[in-house]
Image (tube, grey):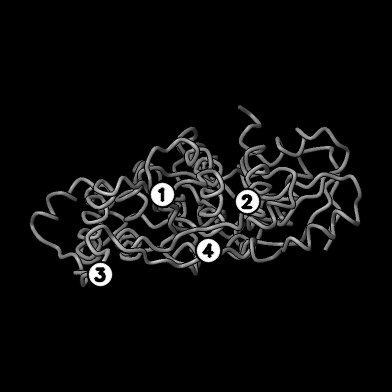
Amino acid sequence: MAICASVIEGHRPRSKSSLNKASPQIVEPEYTPAVAKITEPVRQLLKDVIPDAEWAVHAPYIVAINELKREMNAVLLVHNYQTPEIFHGVADFVGDSLALARKATEVDAEIIVQCGVHFMAETTKLLNPDKTVLIPDLKAGCSLAASITAADVRKMRADNPGVPVVSYVNTTAEVKAETDVCCTSSNAVEVVESLGTDKVIFTPDGYLARYVASKTDVEIIFWEGACEVHERFTGAELRAYRKSYPGIHVIAHPECPPDVLEEADFVGSTSGMINHVGEVRPKQIVMITECSMSDNVAVEYPDVEFIRPCNLCPHMKQITLPKILKALQNMQYRVEIDPAIAERARSSVERMLAIGR
């Protein structure tokens, strides 16, 4: 049953070599025979998704980033929606929001670069308060995170006394601080049912809330937010794919509208979708989610033909190789969270991670 209720700070610290002098001019990396040789294995992996002309631009940055992160004891956490040159070229760990949150608790590196959007960087910082967490671009936001405030959550609590709050991890630290436990698309049903209550407030994704409501007897009181990528898909679009490609296998993310999920052969998180491809190995498949993920998965399954819709996330695409390199060179942009909310926000994330262990 579903009922609808409608700081990160830029920082440019001084490097050890420039404590008392201006930072040196940064030289852009060049494509050389040595760079071509070093990156050839990745080039072969991505030859069907990145043209040669583009590769000559990407390769020098891949080498420079990988060298610099080794020197700095840094790691890159990369979301499944990042472009192939980032996902396959420089990532130390890849995954969906839950996988990256778990990995963030395990890394030994002193510096973590979050190649995702700002709520992911905040989550990483919450779980690593004593480490340096960087995000390469401050404009890498999220329509879901922007759709709700801490005051909105407090109002929902006031309207529904005693009802626990589950918030999608796609939220700000301020919202997480007002939340009992977070969830991701891969564990939302499990988290809701773990509370042992008849009702749950669920924020901020209305479509994910409807999906959860269809999978549980718990009454879901939800906020009407939406992902600007997934909300654009329609059931009619999926039926058109089936007409154009008879027998095509359709898999969709639960942030999509209900008419989309009804047309899908499988519904799951990004990691769930990736695993499903490996298990089923269909002849043709369409992944109803952010389009870079199809490119990233396709290189692993050359026997599967991927029909690609192209709904891009403008926020994820703010992250680029040049910006990642600049983030490492200048130690920008540092993620800082107000101590007044950090402890409460951290608790809601840690409760999520404890479920299912």
Q: Residue 231 in the image: x percent, y percent?
A: 64, 63
Q: Which mark is residue 342?
A: 2
**Residue picked out by circle 3:** 23
Q: Residue 54 in the image: x percent, y percent?
A: 25, 65
Disc 2 to disc 1, how far (Cα)? 18 Å
Q: Which mark is residue 6?
A: none
Q: Going 45% across and 53% down the picture, which residue do you hit?
A: 133
Position of 24 compared to 229: left or right? left
Q: Amino acid at mark 3?
A: Ser
Q: Residue 28 in the image: x percent, y percent?
A: 20, 68
- Indicate the secondary structure of the residue bearing disc 3: loop
Disc 2 to disc 3, how far (Cα)? 32 Å
Q: Amino acid at mark 2?
A: Ala
Q: Mark 1 against mark 3, which lies toward the viewer?
A: 3
Decide: few, some or many residues near mark 4? Use Cα within 10 Å; few <14, some 14-19, many ≥20: some
Q: Amino acid at mark 1?
A: Ile
Which circle's residue, 1 or 3, is located before the other in the chain? 3
Disc 2 to disc 4, how far (Cα)? 13 Å
**Residue picked out by circle 4:** 8
**Residue picked out by circle 1:** 112
Q: Amino acid at mark 4?
A: Ile
Residue 305 visible to an observer of this rendering: no
Position of 109 compared to 52: left or right? right
Q: Going 85% across and 53% down the picture, which residue do you hit?
A: 157
Which circle's residue, 1 or 4, is located before the other in the chain? 4
Q: Going 22% across and 56% down the picture, which residue do you hit?
A: 64
Residue placed most toward the observer, 245 or 174:
174
Which circle's residue, 2 or 4, is located before the other in the chain? 4
Residue most extreme to the front? 20
